[in-house]
Image: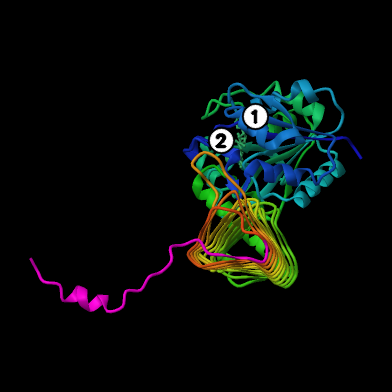
Amino acid sequence: MMNRYAVILAAGQGTRMKSTLYKVLHPVLGRPMVQHVINQIKTVDLDQLVTIVGFGADQVMEDIGSESQFVVQEKQLGTGHAVQQAEGLLKDKDGTTIVVCGDTPLITGETYQALFDHHEKTGAKATVLTTTAPDPTGYGRVIRNDDGEVERIVEHKDATDEELQVNEINTGTYCFDNQALFHALKKVSNDNAQGEYYLPDVIEILRNNKEKVSAFLTPNHSETLGVNDRVALAQAEKIMKKRINENHMRNGVTIIDPDNTYIGPDVIIEQDVMIHPGSIITGSSTIKTNAIIGPHTEITNCTVGEETVVKQSVAKDSQIGNRVQIGPYAHIRPEAQVGNEVKVGNFVEVKKSTIGDKSKVSHLSYIGDANVGSNVNVGCGTITVNYDGKNKFLTTIEDEAFIGCNSNLIAPVTVGKGSYVAAGSTITKDVPGDSLSVARARQTNKEGYATKLKNRKQD
Ligand code: UD1
Ligand code: CA
C-alpha cells in the first residue's frame, strides 16, 4: 500500500456561523466538528496527519492535542492556499494525500477508505469525492465533459446559470498524488468571484496537464453536509443523532423516542437499556444492562450500573452503582460515588461524596463533601453543612447510622456507626457509635395557655 497522508482544513473563520467560537469547534452531539473528522479519518491507516489552523488556532490545537501536527495559515486566502501551508511537511513525499474539510463532520471512515481505494486503483492524480445533492445550493458543482469525465469544479458564486443546474457537488474531500498536488497548487490563481485560491482548481490544472483525474460518487449524500451556518449545524446534529441512535437500537437498546434522545458519539450503552424521551447522554458515559434512563434526564461522563433507574435528573462526572434509584429531580454533581442499591430521591443534591451500598437519601437533602457508609438512612431535609464561606469540610456518616429529618451536620463532623441523630438536630460535635444524639431545644407544653391567649383583652 502507498503511504497515506491527510490534511484537515480548519483555518477558516466561519463568518456565516456568526459566532465568537471558532467554526470547527462548534459541537455536534457534544463533540467539536473537527474532532468528528479526525476520529473518522484516523480509522484509515495514515502515515501523517496535518491540520491547518488559523483564527483561534490555540483553542483548536488544544482541543485536538497530540493527534495531529499543526500548521498555521496566517491569512485565510482560500482552501488552496490553506493546503499549501502543509508544503514544508509533505511536499516531497511519495504517496496519497487526502484533503478533508473540518466542517464536514458526518463523513464516515468507510467513505474515506472507499475514496482512497478508488483513487489508488484508478491511478488518478486526483480523485474528488462527489455526491448528488437534492439541493446543491452553495456547493461547488462538478462539471463533466460529454464522455462523463470530470473536467473541473466551479464554485456556486462563479457558476453560470447552466452550471448551477448541475446537482453533482464537490463534497470538499479529495485524494491526490501528493507531489502532483503541491506542484499544481503553485498554479492556482485567485481570479474568481471570492478572490480566493480555490483548492478545487487543482482538478482543472491537472487535467490541462493531461493528468488523469477522477471522481468518486458516494451515494451517502447525507454524510456530505458542509456546516457553514447554524441551520446546517442543526441538520448535522439531526443526522448524527439518527445515526448514533439507530446504531444503539440495532445493538439492543430501546429508545422510545429517537427524535428526542441525544446520545454522544463516545457513549457506551449495553443491551436492554431503556431510554425515555428527553434524555441527553454525553461524554464518556457508560450505561449498563437493564438500566432505565429518563424521561428528561441529562447524564454527562457517568457510569450508570445495571438495573439502575435515573428519572428526570441531572448527573455529571460520577459513578452510580447497580440497582440504584435516582430521582425524580435529583442532582448528582461531580465526583459522586453512589454504591449499589442506593436510593437518591426527589430534590436531593449529591456532590463529591460517597454513598455506600443500600443507603437511602430519599428526599430534599444536600450531601456534599461527605462519606456516607452503607445501610445509612438520611432523613428528609438533612443538610451536610460543608462550607463556612471560605473552606469546605468533610462529613462522615458511618454504616447503619440513622439521621433524623431536618438535621444539620456541621462539618467537619462524624456520626458513628449505628448511631441515631434526632430529627431537627444541629450536630456540631462528633457522635460516637451506637449513640442517640439530640441537639435541639427541649419542648415545653403550657397547658390551657391557648385559651388564655385568645381571651386577652384589647388595649
Ligand atoms: C468548499 C469548496 C466547495 C465544496 C464545499 C463542500 C472551495 C473553494 N470550495 O466550499 O467546492 O462544495 O467546500 O463543503 O474549496 N479553510 C481554510 N482556509 C481558508 C479557507 C477555508 O482552512 O483560507 C477551511 C475552512 O475552515 C473549512 C474548509 O476549509 O473547514 C472549507 O472552507 P469553506 O469556506 O467552508 O468552503 P465552502 O464555501 O463550504
Ligand atoms: Ca464549508
Tell me the element at label 2: loop
* Quarter holding residue 214: top right
Residue 195 in view of the camera: yes
Region in magenta: 433-459
Nearer to me, 195 or 29: 29
Q: Main secondary structure of the magenta part?
A: loop
Give how far across and how far down residue 252 sits, in percent.
74, 71
Residue at 60% in and 72% down? 256
Nearer to me, 353 or 161: 353
The residue lying furthest to the right in this view is 1
Give how far across and how far down residue 219 sits, in percent.
70, 56
Decide if residue 282 is on the left or right side of residue 447. Answer: right
Marking on residue 404: none
Decide if residue 119 is on the left or right side of residue 77. Answer: right
**Mark 1 close to ligand 1, CB under 8 Å:** yes
Give how far across and how far down residue 218 sits, in percent.
71, 52
* Quarter holding residue 8: top right
Residue 438 magenta? yes
In this figure, which residue is indicated by the disc labeled 1? Answer: 53
On screen, 151 above or below 280? above
Q: Earlier in the sequence, mark 2 or mark 1?
A: 2
The residue lying furthest to the left in this view is 459
Ligand 2, image quadrant it occupies: top right
Quadrant containing the C terminus is bottom left
Tell me the element at label 1: strand
In this figure, which residue is indicated by the disc labeled 2? Answer: 22
User: How many marks are shown on the rendered structure?
Assistant: 2
